[in-house]
Amino acid sequence: GDLLKVKVNKLTSTKTQLPYSYYSLPYCRPNSIVDSAENLGEVLRGDRIENSPYVFKMREPQMCNVVGRIELNAKSAKEFKEKIEDEYRVNMILDNLPLVVPIQRLDQGSPVVYQHGFHVGLKGQYAGSKDEKYFVHNHLTFTVKFHKDMETDWARIVGFEGKPYTVKHEYEGNWSETTRITTCDPHAKRTVTSSESPQEVEDKKEIIFTYDVEFQESDVKWASRWDTYLLMADDQIHWFSIVNSLMIVLFLSGMVAMIMLRTLYRDISKYNQLETQEEAQEETGWKLLHGDVFRPPTNSDLLCVYVGTGVQFFGMILVTMIFAVLGFLSPSNRGGLMTALLLLWVFMGLFAGYASARLYKMFKGSEWKKITLRTAFMFPGAAFAIFFILNALIWGEKSSGAVPFGTMFALVFLWFGISVPLVFVGGYVGFKKPAIEDPVKTNKIPRQITEQAW
């Protein structure tokens, strides 16, 4: 069969948001580490996809393959303990499918659910002892599911599962590459099926990493292989919550509508009951406001900038949702969603400039270049400043989530080279359009608002 190469991705945790490279821990390495090409979204997500020593052939089961042996020192033992304490998980990839660990729920008849990746290790206590110890998962049992073609002997991978174990491997004599392990011996058909004799993480302890490979034929077709990965642990539709929320929304909307209708009806009745011409000329009710409602507010420039930025956000989300519904943002395209959001934000700068310039002209503004410049730099500048500070802190933690210099340069280029010019093009077109006319004439002198008791 073809050679299958398992790739390793970042270490992730639900207790902390900092991802780390797989080789930030002293795992066994191949002869040379090769980084896979990644798109912009993958880099921003902190993915670091690299090759690994886990290599085997298609449809050729393996038993007790030895990856390598390491001896812990105080530093490496501390690193393992920290990652186990923070519940970090190891993520692996085969044929673009992430490694998942099957979990059987306690409910009878419930389907198997999957968790992405496996824990670096676990904490526990020996029987009769109260001291908490750390144990590392050093044996993996891979299950590669494949779908066989009915007409030919070809097969395609449709699933990649794994079960981690912690086992203290034993051997006789001095260690060498040809040493046979007594706890996991393919010649004696002895393999690891439990973690009864776990591998402890301590200074000067040795760890031997091993793995098994099983192949299992599946009825799942290659086109549907991602359906299994998208199953949720709680995929029931909560009809009661949905109906309850809809009823509350309808009830509140009905109350607001009734209040508005009663207010309008009362005002119209008052206008119809005016008896004399003097009373008709006297402004009451909503007539008091008609000459002031379209007056440009204080800091109208900021309002124009905010509206333009809001249009940019709305356009980005709307087009992303359309792409997702049409199936362009498949989960198999790792980092595709992040890349799409970023590129759409850049190109939606055209509509941001147009919207802010149109509103600015409606407010009788004349310096369209100033408002366009603020639209192009105000929100993106604040976001980039926060991003730069956070990235520096993440870089200080030596996390793989830190964006490298090349990607930072690409982001700056997208901002200054594409987004800013598009905002100016949109601003120029928007300001050249005729100003939006107010439906009523605005009074030159603002009506004074009487001071309220509260």
Image: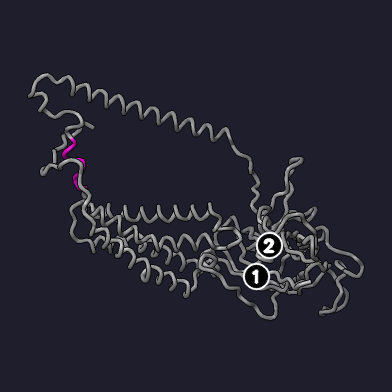
Q: Horizontal placement of 318 versus 242: left or right?
A: left
Residue occupying image coordinates x 72% and y 60%: 158
Give the alpha-carbon distance from disc 2 to disc 1, as whole Å: 10 Å
Stretch of the chain drawn in magenta: 289-296
Q: Is residue 284 above or below residue 314?
A: above
Q: Quadrant of residue 226?
A: bottom right
Callout 2–callout 1 Cβ contact below 8 Å: yes
The residue sitting at the right extreme is 188
Whether the magenta-drawn stretch holds residue 294 is answered as yes
Q: Residue type at mark 1?
A: Leu
Residue occupying image coordinates x 20% and y 44%: 438
Does the rendering let one see residue 212? no
Q: Residue type at mark 2?
A: Val
Out of 205 and 33, give the one closest to the viewer.
Answer: 33
Residue occupying image coordinates x 53% and y 32%: 243
Q: Which residue is mark 1?
A: 25
| x, y percent for residue 85 | 64, 59
| x, y percent for residue 145 | 76, 60
Out of 21 and 116, give the one closest to the viewer.
Answer: 116
